Image (cartoon, grey):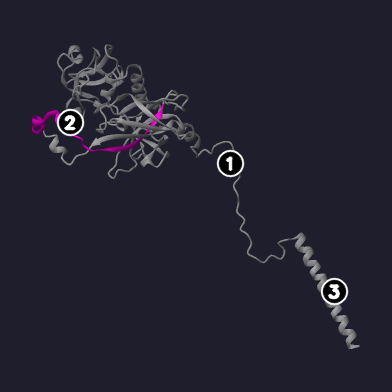
């Protein structure tokens, strides 16, 4: 009796165990994670795929449009090196040995520098800063697609720190120009170049100021100031708007350490285009000139001359037989307008006169003895040597 009961109990247990195993097996088939006691996988919320339209806070389309037209420029210059170079250059020493010194084999080394440039025509014309290529013996241009080409100088304009170079290639991606005159303080701009030689880089900022002058960088200054990071190697690169159009050529920075401090300067396209077109047409840049020396109107001078505001340029001197002298301008006259355009200071005056063509007649407005006077003047051509009087 006991054995029969014992067997029945084991049979019931075996059947129950079999049924349970079958249930577990079936459950694992239909519900794989039902008995999974490991830590659950973290489920993150995935962003939807980007749509065809660019977000309003992105400037990727502008960057993609302009970046192919920005190039890296590598220059090299051979420099003679001698521990006795100062001695060899001594005039008294050269007096006795003359040209024999030039026949000495003096070891040399190559100085390398880098900068950026902007392709302005599909035929290979590239706009850059004059100081990038001014002393170069060889110029190499690296395009955005990886190609490297030798470039030659078409023309330079040290007075605005602009230069035009050319590579032997066609169908290059040329940048689109925008009028820098339409810029406003606060507009978003992007700077593209090759800072520190790390490769093509885009930085973003705003237009901090317009018409910056009296910086002592160039003779003709009308800079766009921006806080977009501009570092060594960016010189000659592009400053573009949010549509990818060129508004300036990056030129200089204000820095105490050599790196960006949030104050960068770019040459506006209005000026760059004028210089470029003249270089292409005649190989150099011709500017208007009238032969005067001028200074800014300070608040003290404005009060002395009984002016309503400190604006204009005081004529401090007139060069004899110059266009200004022939037209009757005199020291003490205050120049307030040229061809209807207001003269804010001596820097503005310099730029307005330079933009005039030689031999054209222009009307200048002056204040003389408290009275407003219009004078017609025949514009001359700015002499080659740098002169104090404009």
Dot 2 falls on a residue whose secondary structure is helix
Residue on which disc 3 sits: 15
Q: Residue 207's image quarter?
A: top left
Tell us which disc is closer to us: 1 or 3: 3
Say left or right for 110 vs 25.
Answer: left
Dot 3 falls on a residue whose secondary structure is helix
**In magenta segment, residue 273:** no
Q: Residue 53's image quarter?
A: top right
**In magenta segment, residue 94:** yes
Question: Tag 3 or tag 2, which sits nearer the N-term?
Answer: 3
* Contact flag, marks 1 and 3 (Cβ < 8 Å): no
Tally the marks: 3
Question: Tag 2 or tag 1, which sits nearer the N-term?
Answer: 1
Tell us which disc is closer to us: 2 or 3: 2
| Alpha-carbon span between mark 2 and mark 3 | 112 Å
Name the quarter where the C terminus is drawn: top left
Q: Position of residue 221 (x, y in %)?
A: 29, 29
Q: Residue 147's image quarter?
A: top left
Closer to us: 29 or 260:
29
Residue on which disc 2 sits: 102
| Alpha-carbon span between mark 1 and mark 3 | 58 Å
Work out whether residue 313 can be spotted.
yes
Residue on which disc 1 sits: 50
The structure residue drawn at horizontal position 83% and vertical position 77%, both measured from the top left corner, is 13
Vertical side of 180 occupied by 318: above or below: above
Closer to us: 92 or 186:
92
* Contact flag, marks 1 and 2 (Cβ < 8 Å): no
| Alpha-carbon span between mark 1 and mark 2 | 67 Å
Residue range highlighted in magenta? 91-119
């Amino acid at each position: 009796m006991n054995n029969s009961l014992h067997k029945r109990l084991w049979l019931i247990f075996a059947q129950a165990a079999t049924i349970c195993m079958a249930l577990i097996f079936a459950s694992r088939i239909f519900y794989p994670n039902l008995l999974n006691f490991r830590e659950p996988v973290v489920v993150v919320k995935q962003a939807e795929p980007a749509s065809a339209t660019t977000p309003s806070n992105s400037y990727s389309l502008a960057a993609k449009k302009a970046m192919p037209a920005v190039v890296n420029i590598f220059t090299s210059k051979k420099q003679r090196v001698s521990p006795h170079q100062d001695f060899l250059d001594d005039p008294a020493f050269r007096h006795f040995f003359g040209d024999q010194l030039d026949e000495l084999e003096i070891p040399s080394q190559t100085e390398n520098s880098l900068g950026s440039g902007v392709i302005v025509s599909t035929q290979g014309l590239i706009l850059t800063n004059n100081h990038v290529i001014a002393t170069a013996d060889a110029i190499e241009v690296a395009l955005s697609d990886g190609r490297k080409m030798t470039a030659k100088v078409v023309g330079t304009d040290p007075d605005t720190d602009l230069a035009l170079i050319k590579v032997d290639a066609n169908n290059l991606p040329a940048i689109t120009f925008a009028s820098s005159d339409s810029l406003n303080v606060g507009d978003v701009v992007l700077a593209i170049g090759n800072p520190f030689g790390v490769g093509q880089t885009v930085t973003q900022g705003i237009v901090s100021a317009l018409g910056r002058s009296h910086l002592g960088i160039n003779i003709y200054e009308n800079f766009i100031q921006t806080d977009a990071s501009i570092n060594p190697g960016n010189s000659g690169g592009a400053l573009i708007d949010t549509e990818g159009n060129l508004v300036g050529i990056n030129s200089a920075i204000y820095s105490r350490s050599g790196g960006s401090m949030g104050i960068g300067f770019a040459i506006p396209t209005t000026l760059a285009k004028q210089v470029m077109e003249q270089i292409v047409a005649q190989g150099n840049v011709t500017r208007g000139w009238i032969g005067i020396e001028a200074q800014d109107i300070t608040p003290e001078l404005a009060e002395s001359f009984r002016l309503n505001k400190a604006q204009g340029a005081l004529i401090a001197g007139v060069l004899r037989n110059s266009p200004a002298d022939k037209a009757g301008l005199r020291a003490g006259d205050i120049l307030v307008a040229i061809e209807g355009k207001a003269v804010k200071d001596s820097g503005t005056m310099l730029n307005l006169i330079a933009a005039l063509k030689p031999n054209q007649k222009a009307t200048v407005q002056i204040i003389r003895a408290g009275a407003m006077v219009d004078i017609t003047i025949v514009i001359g051509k700015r002499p080659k040597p740098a002169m104090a009087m404009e």
